Amino acid sequence: MSIAATTSWDSSVLPERQERFIAQKARDGAEFLAALGMTVLCGGPMPKLTIAIDGPAGSGKSTVARRVAQMLGYLYLDSGAMYRALALKALRQQVTLDNEGALEELARGTHIELKSPTPEQEAAGAKNRVFLDGEEVTPEIRTAEVAQAASRLAAIAGVRKVLVAEQQRAGAGGGIVMEGRDIGTVVFPNAELKIFLDASPEVRAERRWKEHQEKGEAMALAQVVEEVRERDRRDRERKVSPLVRATDAVLVDNTAMDAEEIARLIVMLGREREKELANATGRKT
Ligand code: DC
């Protein structure tokens, strides 16, 4: 398995007013200290964090994680897209989803690339572009069939080992927001900021149902509720790396808040962590 993740943010999307506000505050602070006869020492760039966002299906992780990465200028990696892409390959090659050896072998020989979506894809709800062995499979991996297959294949220890190693390699330098089920517990247990995003099963199922509707896929709400329940159960009850909240993760309930509010909250927590780390490593501001 190899993966390549690139996310190039258009700098014009960064909240310009926020940047100006921060720059002004820095100037105000420097002037205040100068008036007291003190100097300001800036010891290089702020440390770049690893931010882990975990949660069940439909909790809004992708929207929030992508937005957080955008606001911080970090790399964004959707680990679920990797399990989905591999599941699609297994379905296409008719590898049965209980053939552990064959699936691990398949994982080892797969190249997955994650890129930013085009504006058209973004307007259609895509959070990233996914390439499987060079072929774009962005819409193909979002079907209910692939979601269930991904959840089954993700219960196999050998498959997880291969994917987790790639995720760790991709995030090794920090400055990344990675979303999934086991990011804060297994992939990056030392992540500087961990979020567990949750919402009621009804709200999560309704969100998924709306996504299917927008894509023109007719599905009864009751069917989507059942699928979300089944995936929840499998993801939470599997023996290897089940979906659990890391003890040091901040629990954020997304039932009532919207994605933008949650992203801003996480960015605020991230900025605090950056400052704490900068202070701990002796960087003076
Ligand atoms: O986030 P998602 O719904 O796209 O993920 C699809 C499946 O992949 C999910 O049901 C469980 C699995 N998965 C996982 O086991 N571990 C991850 N870190 C991400 C996804």
Image (cartoon, rainbow, N blue to C red):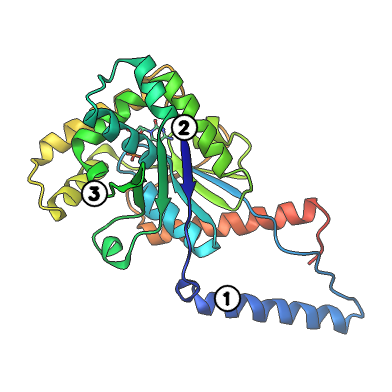
Q: Position of residue 211 (x, y in %)?
A: 20, 51
Q: CA distance from mark 1 to mark 2?
A: 36 Å
The residue under label 3 is 139
Q: Is residue 51 left or right of residue 229?
A: right
Q: Nearer the viewer, residue 168 or 191?
A: 168
Q: Is residue 60 above or below residue 1?
A: below
Say few, some or many: other residues with alpha carbon within 10 Å of mark 1 (under 14 / 14 to 19 / 20 or more): few
Circle 2 Cα neighbour tier, 10 Å, few/some/many (<14 / 14–19 / ≥20):
many
Of circles 1 and 2, the one toward us is 2
Q: Name the mark nearer the viewer: 3 or 1.
A: 3
Identify the amino acid type marked 1.
Glu
Q: Quadrant of the C terminus?
A: bottom right
Residue of label 1: 19
Vertical placement of residue 95 versus 246, above or below: above
Q: Residue at x 54, y 32 (%)?
A: 165
Q: Nearer the viewer, residue 63 or 97?
A: 97
Residue at mark 2: C-beta within 8 A of ligand 1: yes
Secondary structure state at the residue bearing disc 3: loop
Counting residues from the N terminus, which is met first, the one under dot 3 or under dot 1? 1
| Residue underneath mark 2 | 163
Q: Identity of the amino acid at label 3?
A: Pro
Mark 1 vs 2: CB contact within 8 A: no
